[in-house]
C-alpha cells in the first residue's frame, strides 16, 4: 500500500516467541498478557504469541492471549508437520484475526547436519506444510530457516513453490546473523526478479543480531522490496537478540525522506512498551540503548548542551516525546487517589482489571507511607510484585530476619500453596547468602548463583532496591527479580521467584520430527 508515496511496512512482533527464547527471559501468563496488550496499544500489525506444541504452558498462553486480546493478527509458530500445525491451529482458532506461521530450514548446513534431508525432500515437506496450514487459515506465513545461508536459486524455488501452495507471506530469515546489508538486500532483489508469483505474497525478513547488523540488514531488505519486518521490543532474543522494533520503526519514521516507507506504529508508546517488556523479562535496558535507553536523549557535553538550548535539532534527530519519554515524571504520594494511580499505570503501558487495581492500590498506599514520593519506577516495581504473585509459585515468603554477626545468619518462614508453613535457619558468607541457604533448605532446591545485581528502582535516599539474580540448575539458566525498600527482603523475593520457576517448570512435550530441533526456529 502506498500512501503519499510512502509504502506501508508490516510490523511483526515476536517478543513473546523469539524474544522469550533468550536464556532466562521466560514470562508467566499474566506478564505475557500485559506485554500483548502493550503491543496492541503500540499498534503492531502481527503478534507472534508462541510455539504452541512446545509445551502445555506455551499452548495455554497462546490460546488465552488469542482469545483475550483483539486488534493485531495473532500468529502461532509451527514446524512443517501435521502435529505442529494442528496444535497451532487449535491454540489460535478463537482469535478474531489469526495467522499460521510454518517454518523449515533450507540451508546446506541445516539440510545435511540437522534435518538430513535432500533438497527435494525439503521442498516436498515445505509445500505439504503450507498446504495443510492453508486448509485451516487464509493467512499463512512460510519461513525458510537460515535463508541467508541458502543457495539463492534454490531459495527462489522454495519460495515460488510455497506461494503456489498458498503462502501469503514468505519470510527470509537471517537466522544466525551472518548476512551483510548489501548481500541481504541482493538476496531479496533476486527473489523479486526470479520468483514467479512473488507479487502474490508479502516478503518478510527476520534478522538476528550476532554481528550487530539486525536493524541494518532489515532496512536494507526493505529498500530491496521486503514489506514486513519481524522484530522484538528492546531487541531481545536468542544469543545477541533480534532486530529491535523501536530502532527499525524510528529509523523508518526519522528517515522517511530517504526510505519512503511508513509503519502503523504509535511511536509515543515505544518507551512504555520497552519498560513493560523489561519488567516482565528481567532484562534491563542498557543506558546507551538507542531510542529507549536512559541516555538516548541525555546531553552532558557543554557544547551539546549549548547547542540544545539554541535549537534542539542541533543534537537531537528525534523528539523524546515522539517515543513517549516525557520531561516530567508524575509524582504520587499517600494522598493520591485510585483514579490517578490507574491513569498513570495506563500511561506506563499497564492495563489492570478492577481486582488487580485494588491490590496494587493497597500496596501503593503501604509504599507511600514508607516513602515521601512514589515515582514511575516504584509503580513498575509494584507491577513486578503483582506479576510474581500471579505466577502462583509453590512458595510464598511470610517473614525473614537476618543478622550480620559471626557467622552471618538468617531465619526464613515460607508458605506453600498447599497451606503448609515451614521455617528454617541457616548461616552464610553474608546475610543475603544466609537467606538464600535458608530458602534452599525449606524448598529442597539447590541452585548455583551465577549473577547477582542490585540497582535503584527510583531516585532518592528512600528509593526501592531492585535485585536481579540468575542461577544455573540442571543445565538451565533462570532469572528472578525482587523489589523492596529492604535489599535483603528484595533479594529473598528474587531468589524465591527463581526457585519457584524451577519447581514449577513444565517438561516440554515436543512431538519428534526426525532430527529437527525445537529451539533453532528462525
Image (tube, helix red, strand yellow):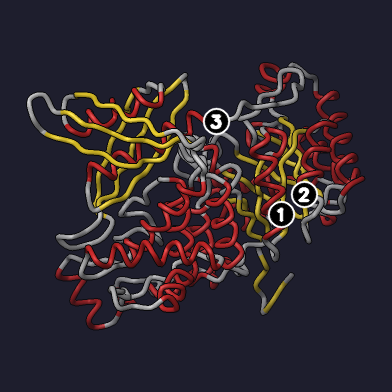
Pointer 2 with pointer 3, Cβ within 8 A: no
Identify the residue at image location x=71%, y=39%.
Answer: 52
Q: State the CA–CA distance, disc 2 to disc 3.
A: 23 Å
Q: Which of marks 3 and 1 is in front?
A: 3
Q: Is residue 136 left or right of residue 343?
A: right
Classed neighbour count for the residue bearing mark 3: other residues with Cα under 10 Å, few (<14), some (14–19), many (≥20): few
Position of 115 with respect to 399 (left or right) is: right
- Element under label 1? helix
Q: Of marks 3 and 1, which one's residue comes earlier in the chain?
A: 1
| Residue 378 image position (x, y, % from top left) | 32, 61
- In contact (CB < 8 Å): disc 3 and disc 1: no
To which residue does mark 1 refer? Answer: 66
Instruction: Tell me which residue sits at (78%, 46%) in the image.
Output: 100
In the depicted view, which residue is nearer to us: 160 or 363? 363
- The C terminus: image quadrant: top right
Disc 3 designates what residue? 505
Tell me: 231 left or right of 128.
left
Quadrant in the rendering for residue 212 = top left
Q: Is mark 2 on a helix, strand or loop?
A: helix
Quadrant containing the N terminus in the rendered view: bottom right
State how far apart marks 1 and 2 are (Cα). 6 Å
The residue at the far left in this view is 406
Label 3, label 1: how far apart the Cα atoms are: 23 Å
Amino acid at each position: 500500500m502506498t500512501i503519499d508515496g510512502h509504502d506501508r511496512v508490516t510490523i511483526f512482533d515476536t517478543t513473546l516467541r523469539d524474544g522469550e527464547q533468550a536464556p532466562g527471559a521466560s514470562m508467566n501468563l499474566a506478564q505475557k498478557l500485559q506485554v500483548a496488550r502493550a503491543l496492541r496499544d503500540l499498534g503492531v500489525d502481527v503478534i507472534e504469541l508462541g510455539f504452541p506444541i512446545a509445551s502445555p504452558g506455551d499452548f495455554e498462553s497462546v490460546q488465552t492471549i488469542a482469545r483475550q486480546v483483539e486488534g493485531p493478527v495473532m500468529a502461532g509458530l509451527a514446524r512443517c508437520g501435521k502435529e505442529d500445525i494442528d496444535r497451532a491451529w487449535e491454540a489460535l482458532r478463537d482469535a478474531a484475526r489469526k495467522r499460521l506461521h510454518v517454518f523449515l530450514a533450507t540451508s546446506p548446513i541445516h539440510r545435511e547436519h540437522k534435518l538430513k534431508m535432500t533438497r527435494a525432500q525439503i521442498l516436498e515437506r515445505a509445500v505439504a506444510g503450507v498446504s495443510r496450514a492453508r486448509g485451516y487459515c487464509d493467512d499463512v506465513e512460510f519461513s525458510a530457516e537460515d535463508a541467508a545461508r541458502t543457495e539463492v536459486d534454490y531459495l527462489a524455488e522454495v519460495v515460488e513453490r510455497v506461494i503456489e501452495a498458498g503462502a501469503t507471506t514468505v519470510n527470509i530469515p537471517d537466522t544466525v546473523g551472518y548476512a551483510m546489508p548489501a548481500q541481504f538486500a541482493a538476496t531479496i532483489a533476486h527473489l523479486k526478479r526470479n520468483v514467479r508469483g512473488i507479487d502474490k505474497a508479502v516478503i518478510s525478513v527476520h534478522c538476528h543480531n550476532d554481528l550487530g547488523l539486525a536493524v541494518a540488514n532489515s532496512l536494507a531488505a526493505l529498500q530491496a522490496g521486503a514489506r514486513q519486518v519481524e522484530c522484538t521490543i528492546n531487541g531481545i532474543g536468542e544469543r545477541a537478540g533480534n532486530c529491535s522494533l523501536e530502532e527499525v520503526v524510528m529509523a523508518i519514521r526519522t528517515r522517511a525522506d530517504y526510505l519512503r516507507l511508513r509503519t502503523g506504529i504509535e511511536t509515543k508508546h515505544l518507551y512504555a512498551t520497552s519498560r513493560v517488556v523489561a519488567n516482565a523479562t528481567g532484562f534491563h535496558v542498557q543506558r546507551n540503548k538507542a531510542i529507549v535507553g536512559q541516555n538516548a536523549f541525555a546531553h552532558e557535553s557543554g557544547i551539546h548542551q549549548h547547542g540544545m538550548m539554541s535549537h534542539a535539532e542541533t543534537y537531537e534527530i528525534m523528539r523524546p516525546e515522539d517515543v513517549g519519554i516525557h520531561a516530567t515524571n508524575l509524582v504520587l504520594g499517600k494522598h493520591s487517589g485510585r483514579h490517578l494511580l490507574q491513569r498513570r499505570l495506563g500511561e506506563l503501558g499497564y492495563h489492570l482489571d478492577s481486582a488487580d487495581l485494588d491490590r496494587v492500590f493497597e500496596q501503593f498506599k503501604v509504599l507511600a507511607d514508607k516513602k515521601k514520593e512514589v515515582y514511575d519506577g516504584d509503580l513498575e516495581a509494584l507491577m513486578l510484585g503483582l506479576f510474581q504473585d500471579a505466577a502462583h509459585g509453590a512458595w510464598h515468603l511470610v517473614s525473614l530476619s537476618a543478622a550480620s554477626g559471626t557467622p552471618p545468619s538468617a531465619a526464613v518462614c515460607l508458605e506453600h500453596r498447599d497451606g503448609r508453613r515451614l521455617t528454617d535457619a541457616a548461616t552464610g558468607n553474608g546475610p543475603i547468602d544466609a537467606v538464600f541457604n535458608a530458602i534452599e533448605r525449606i524448598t529442597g532446591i539447590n541452585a548455583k548463583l551465577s549473577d547477582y545485581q542490585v540497582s535503584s528502582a527510583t531516585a532518592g535516599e528512600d528509593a526501592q532496591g531492585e535485585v536481579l539474580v540468575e542461577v544455573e540448575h540442571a543445565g538451565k539458566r533462570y532469572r528472578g527479580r525482587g523489589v523492596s525498600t529492604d535489599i535483603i527482603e528484595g533479594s529473598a523475593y528474587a531468589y524465591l521467584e527463581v526457585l519457584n520457576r524451577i519447581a514449577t517448570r513444565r517438561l516440554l512435550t515436543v512431538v519428534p520430527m526426525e532430527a529437527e530441533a525445537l529451539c533453532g526456529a528462525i
